[in-house]
Amino acid sequence: MEILELMRSEIMLTLVIMMLLIATLSDAKWSNQTMITVVNIGLLGLLAVGFIFNKSGSLFGDMFATNDLLRLEKNILTLGTLIISLQAGPWLRKQENAMEFYLLLLTTLLGMFLMLSAGNLLMFYLGLEMSTLPIAALANFDLKKRRSSEAALKLILSSAFASGMLLFGISWLYGTTGSISFALLPGLLTGSPLQLFALILLIAGFGFKISAVPFHLWTADVYEGAPMPVTAYLSVVSKGAVLFVFLSVLFKVFGSLENAWYAIIVTLSIATMLIGNLFALRQQQIKRFLAFSSVAQIGFILLAISGGTVQSTTATIFFVLVYLFSNLAAFGVAGLISEATGREQLADYKGLHRSNPALAWMMALAMFSLAGVPPMAGFFGKFFLIIAGASKGNWFFIVFASLNIIIAMAYYLRLVRLMFMDTTDNPVVKINIPLQSRLALLLCTGGILLTGIFSGAYEYIYSLVSN
Amino acid sequence: MNLLLLLLIPVLTLAGIGLLPAKKAKWMALLGSVVQLVACIILLRLFLQQPDATLSGALLFQNDYTWYSSLNIHLHTGIDGISLSMILLTSLVMLAGVLVSWNIQKMTKEFFMLLMLLSAGAYGFFISLDLFVVFFFLEIAVIPKFMLIGIWGSGKKEYSATKLALMLMGASAMIFVGLIGLYYQDQGADGFNLVALAANPAPLAVQKFFFPFAFIGFGVFTALFPFHTWVPDGHSSAPTAGSMFLAGISMKLGGYGCLRVATYLMPDAAHYYAPWIILLAAIAILYGAFATMMQTDLKYINAYSSVSHCGFVLLGIGVLTKTGIAGAVIQMVSHGLMTALFFAMIGMVYERTHTRDIAKMGGLLKSIPFISTLFVMVALCSLGLPGFSGFVAEMMVFIGAWENANPLYRIATLAATASIVVTAVYILNTVGKVIMGPVKKESFLHLKDAAWYEKSAALLLIAGILLIGMAPFLIINLIEPGTQSIMDKITLISGK
Amino acid sequence: MNYLQEILVISTALFFIGIYGLLTRRNIIAILMSVELMLNSVNINFVAFNKYLYPNSLDGIFFSIFIITIAAAEVALAIAIVINLYRNHDSVDIDSTTLLKY
Amino acid sequence: MDTSKIIFYLLGGFILGMALLAVTEKKIFRSAIWLLFALIGIAGLYFWMALEFIAAVQIIVYVGGIVVLIIFSVFLTHQAEDDMPKTGLSRKIAAGLAVISGAAFTIHLFLNNDFNLSAIPFDSDVARIGTAMLETGTGGYLLPFEAVSMLLLAAMVGCIVIAIRPEKSEMNDSENPPSFSNPPTRNPEPVEGILN
Amino acid sequence: MNYAQYIPLLLALPLLSFAILGIWGRKSLKKSSGIIGTMVLLILTIISIAVATHYFFIGEKLNNGYQTIFALNIPWLNFGYKNLSIDIGLLLDPISVMMLVVITVVSLMVHIFSLGYMKGEERYPTYFAFLSLFTFSMLGLVLSANIFQMYIFWELVGVSSYLLIGFYFTQPKAVAAAKKAFIVTRFADLGFLIGILMLGIQAETFDFLTLIERLTNAESTAYINMHTTSFLGISALTWALSLVFVGGAGKSAMFPLHIWLPDAMEGPTPVSALIHAATMVVAGVFLVARLFPIFHFNHTALNLVAWTGALSALFAAVIACTQTDIKRVLAYSTMSQIGYMMFALGVSGYGGESGLGYTASLFHLFTHAFFKSLLFLGAGIIIHAIHSNDLKDMGGLRHALPVTHLTFLIACLAIAGVPPLSGFFSKEEILLAAWEGNRMIFTIGLLTAGLTAFYMFRLYFLIFWNRPATKVISKEAPASMKIPLIILAAISLVAGFIPFSQLVTTDQQPFKSSFHVLFSIAPLLLVIAGIFTAMRLYKNPGEKAAHLAQWFGKFYQGALHKFYIDEVYLFITRNFIYKIIGSPAARFDKQVVDGGVNGLGNGTRFIAEKIKALQNGRVQWYLLVFLGGILILSFIFIGWNKI
């Protein structure tokens, strides 16, 4: 029964998937609304299950491991999925393939769980693919839209290429060490050039998933083309999951090569911040805008990661949590507007405050949080990231990051400006916010406002990480 | 008294405004500000009753709550006379700001909520003894300013709002680097604790590297030349209460930070960079004054004059003498009150004449004597007339600067003193064109004089100005222990 | 007697040939074919390493088995997407999928 | 120069040659055939390494599955006999340069790496693989096996959803990039889902 | 000293009156404000005369000299540096007591006069409030025990002057004049301030007595420091004193800082009488007199005082001869007379009889205050009567305004220095002192005396004779306006007999001044010549004056245009301050500082636009970049050397 205790999240998720499958294949014709409700309850249950009975251990040799930190990470992902699922309601209700949507979505979540708990490179690779491939299908979910299929194509091609690179790297790693186990690898690493090459390939593979420059180019296109909930999922949950794994792989497995990867991470971080910010500055479409904003945020996360300390891990996990709330708030609002009016240009947000003050304030909160303005949680997130990154004393880097905050501020404020200060004769109509979306937005607001002010979340993560 | 009460009041008011209907918002805001002012006065009384309030520079009413224990971040509060005078300034300006905004029609609720958020930021900033918290509150105030200017402002408001927000954000970023530098000077052992960091200053090399970040960062807030360009645009586009807050309090955040964070924590570097600070301050003073001379928009006039006046703050800090620092502090309070009042008066004039171009006004004294009289009074305060607070502050800065016989200091002092003439030129020019002179428009003869809320706002501020101007010993005694303890740090260093 | 290095040369060459195809072919299906070449090269690596260097465990073998499996899934999904794209675009030219840019 | 070696070089040459043809051939269908040969060559290489199981899997999955799938899709997209669109020279040169430098770099790296050849012969018994696959303990691969089944399920569902589609594309999803100045470029979608 | 306790009242009452009239005057005290103000002044006058009587005639003397009494000394602003502080103190010594009398009496007269003169003005209460403010400031100035305190009141005096000059605020000329007065004196005050800083920081005190003590004691460190440090070859002390004197010169309208004074005549005429004739403008003289011991030990500074005074005296007298605005003539005359006082100080010695110049200067200050205010008040009546300032509109007014005519004549005789009127004695003493001090200056003084007589009587004849009676718009003024004239005339008649050398001396020890009849012949002759010339030229209408002017040619034109000093200032401010400093600063701000920030923003945006091709929508390009990224990272971090 150890398996039930340790893998309960995964098992429960599988059960939900199976239930969906069975419900569809049998004659029980669930309406979309029923399905949404069932899945939401399921996710809520998953969240609940994740919080109780803490037990650490490993299964299947050491292919599957779990502990409190991993459980927390999984919970964060589940929470993100739940919020997205709540927000997706209006869109999903009109879809013919709601079941498939959820099936694919939950499979990717399962993949992420497995990836997080992975004890060796094979499980990690499987989890990674499992959390990527279905998303390509999801990206294509607006079947009749060219943009959607183009996005899916770009995603799957890039992802195939990236996993090719990743596998190439893993193969060299395997070739030089003879192991694919995370537990054994650290002892076998020597830092030979070939291993460094493998490390770079591995980082590139991760970099692709978290959209670090220069591996990020797919991001904006896919975000723009994919349906809004999928974009939100891509930008928050899937990115968060890979980040979590990246942290542990980099610190635990490649900890001995810190000198090697430090410079690489710094380089990537600088490029990511700069390119992300510069591109975000000139975006006109909300999803592309958020895409590049997320690229820039990754730059800051890489900054923290470069610190290589317990604080780095804590700050990153905390930031993912904060970022989840902030970004999902933004996507939630954008999704509502897009769903009700089909408008996704930034210019369409002009005068939003007049017609939809609540949405405008919501969006503004999200923007402020992303920009890192107190008392929003984003401020704390960013501050801690930079503190963690500064531990190495690379002040040029810190100054550079600080300067990037200004550029970031410029484009986040631009959206606020459009919503609050600009006027237009063709504003978005008054939008009725369904209960589920309301709930999701409320959750996000709470998260944005409270996560930072109350130190509980951060300290909890810290206590888990430092164990 | 737990200083967090000072934070609680605006936050509660903010919540209250949020819950009440829009029509009641201003009353709630007024209530909140009055309560705040009362609380501040009670605080002042309690402060003065403390046996060691005037004896040592100890920071009183300290409370220390752990916030982020893993990062050694504490919600650590405490005040000395300097912060107390800033707190009093804030409460006065906020109350006046609420009063002059009585007629706000657009999005009343949001307006007052943002105003309360601003004041919460300012109070928090002044009571904090933890650099993280200081930074937190400093940044809290940026966005409300942006919103206030952008939504309720006038002219090229979006541009100004963005510029202000970005420049202040940039400044924050620099401060941020400085703070992290201080944090890591001893690998985070002292955390962000201001008291501990002051007791254990960093090595000179570290200070030299981080001082410019902190000082310039805070300096931008207080219109350090050449980073002052947000001031004119921001102030002139902001709504009246916004300008009042910006010039009256927000710029003081910078001055206070320069003093409390940069100079206090990095005294060696302060000595090292003092000539540069003085140079920039002297330039700001004269240059601001000359630039003001060429302006024709009332708000621009006051904004540029703020650049000039805040130069005195920086000069006072830069000379690193007790008199100079005390002068800087008094100048902060004085300029806060004065410029807030000036903006209030400009707002009242603008509301009536619908223009801010001085060439288009004239003879306002005829129809709106109250506003005009106050306008003239605040103008006279601005040019440093004895009896008003500006004089006291400027003289202290002059004396403080003249104490040092170094030619650079002398030249800087001369430049600063020369500004009093230029100030007279633009101030009298303005008064001559706006208040005096022939009545330019028929409609100016039938303007309505100040209403009760406007009167009370103006009187509140002028009372503060006159109090400092007539009885400067009060504020000097109040801030003396604080300046002394900063001075001790500085002289200790220069002695070694 | 082994040819490990030679095998590695072959696999590396294969990998980069695959990349070359991926970067230069304009037909999306041809690009997918190039991807297969890349994955196959990795498989050769794993198998060769397992056989010649680390015969004690089966990690390499299994890795390549799973890669093959996943490659199948991947290509199936990609082809589904291509077919859908073809319906939308009437083209399988990669250069026609530049609606999303900048 | 023994036979094994000759076979090996022949195989290697065959694989690389076929692969090169596969990525340069103008006609997609022929390209697919070259790919088929390359894959078979790789299977041959596995045979040469005495790894019959992997070779079998290679043939079954690749040759029997993937290439067939590809060929189907080639037919589905009606381009089997057409010349594929030409690639620009600059793209070829850029890709070529990157690829050649990458390959040279990689080859250089591993040639300079000391691989410790194992003295133990490799046991390529299929039973060993089968046992390991269903083993739950150390060295067992049950979990990935189960996981990949979920992945395949999801991929299948995804393929079904995407490939099976009732009608033709909407044309209002315009070719032009969205204009940035004017508000909506697309017609609003029906809103009844949200206003209830 | 029991009477000293009333001294604070001298400051408190007018301040109170200002506050009351300022706050409530406009509404509730509209009618009674004039009376309130005047009553307050009456009380002040009584107090100050009582104080003067006590101080000079009843109070104890120390070593036969007058004591210096501190009526009050409270720390006001402590600088926290070497005991430097601004103390609010009230210092009684002969000159301050003398000034008290002058200020309160003249102020009272002006108040009374204003009751009639300003009647019906819309801002009547405000006017009296301002007068109270001025009286407060002026009294504070003379009673200051601390140089910084003096500076404070100095500024306050300036601002009340500003407010009063600009009283008719709708007239652009008045506004401009007020502004000019304030700015010019502010500019001079800058010198004063810097001088204070230099003196104060070195002497480590701002207190007058200590300051004097330290800076006259050749052994004190302050003295040595200030003598040894020098800048441009001039010792610090000289610099400091000269700068302080610049402040005094500005307030006292000495050349070349006099340009504000004629324009200041735009204010109500009683204000001119009070501020710009009798009290405020002599503040500079008072300042130098106050610091006289220090000045005395510094010849350079003292010479500067003397020469500035002499030049101004002559310069103003020449201009006064040509002006056609009654008040401007009086203004230049004031400037000329203050020049007298200045050079008297400048040529004075210290102690005993050698301090005659000092005594004479203050004596002249005293007498001048009365007859000059009398002249102004008279002019006020005239202007009131014919609603014009211009001499061309006047003539033959002696019948219409008999009282004015008589008192005006007395004043003219007094200022011209005709015995036995007050001006004669004071001027005589000044010339005597100059004779003993500096012959050049004496000559200038002599010349100026003749000119004074000439232009005063030119004025007199042009107003009251010259033409057949001009039509008078209003009758001669009410009693409230006449009474001050008569009182002042009476004082002007007799004030010369006050034994000033018994009262106000450099070392506060009375001495006997000797009166040299023979010495007074020369100036007297010149005066008579001046009067006679004026009579010939102006008593009857005619072309003679015009011919004379013709004869002087360019010189006349120059004098008429005040020697183009205003134009020079205008040129400097326009072309230098505005064009070379002001507008470049503003432009610099717009283009460089502002432009820098905007440029940064636009530059970022520009770069962002330029690099957009990176994201060109082609997935193969993306992957090429991907590969390129990996390769570059590998090359950099694994290194070329390993390849």
Image: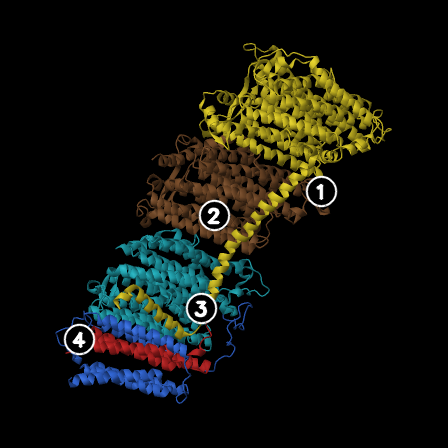
Chain colours: A cyan, B brown, C red, D blue, E yellow
From where the camera sits, is residue E553 visible? yes
Residue type pointed to by label 2: Val
Give the answer, above or below, for where E95 lies relative to E79: above
- State the separation of the CA atoms marked 4 and 2: 66 Å
- Callout 4 crowding tier (Cα within 10 Å): few <14, some 14–19, many ≥20: many
- State the separation of the CA atoms marked 4 and 3: 54 Å
> Which numbered disc covers residue A89?
3
* Image quarter hosting the N terminus of chain E: top right
Count of labels in the image: 4
Along the viewing direction, whichever of E52 and B370 lies nearer the viewer = E52
- State the separation of the CA atoms marked 1 and 2: 40 Å
Disc 4: which residue? C52
> Would you say E118 lies left or right of A287 here?
right
**Image marks 1 and 2: residues in contact by CB distance under 8 Å:** no
* Image quarter hosting the C terminus of chain E: bottom left
Q: Are marks 1 and 3 on the same chain?
A: no
Q: Are marks 4 and 1 on the same chain?
A: no
Residue type pointed to by label 3: Gly
Disc 1: which residue? B438
Mark 4 falls within which chain?
A: C
Q: Dot 4: what SS?
A: helix
Give the x, y percent position of residue E139.
Answer: 61, 24
Give the x, y percent position of residue E493.
Answer: 73, 17
Give the answer, above or below, for where D14 lies relative to B98: below
Disc 2: which residue? B220
- Callout 1 crowding tier (Cα within 10 Å): few <14, some 14–19, many ≥20: many
> Which numbered disc covers residue E65?
none
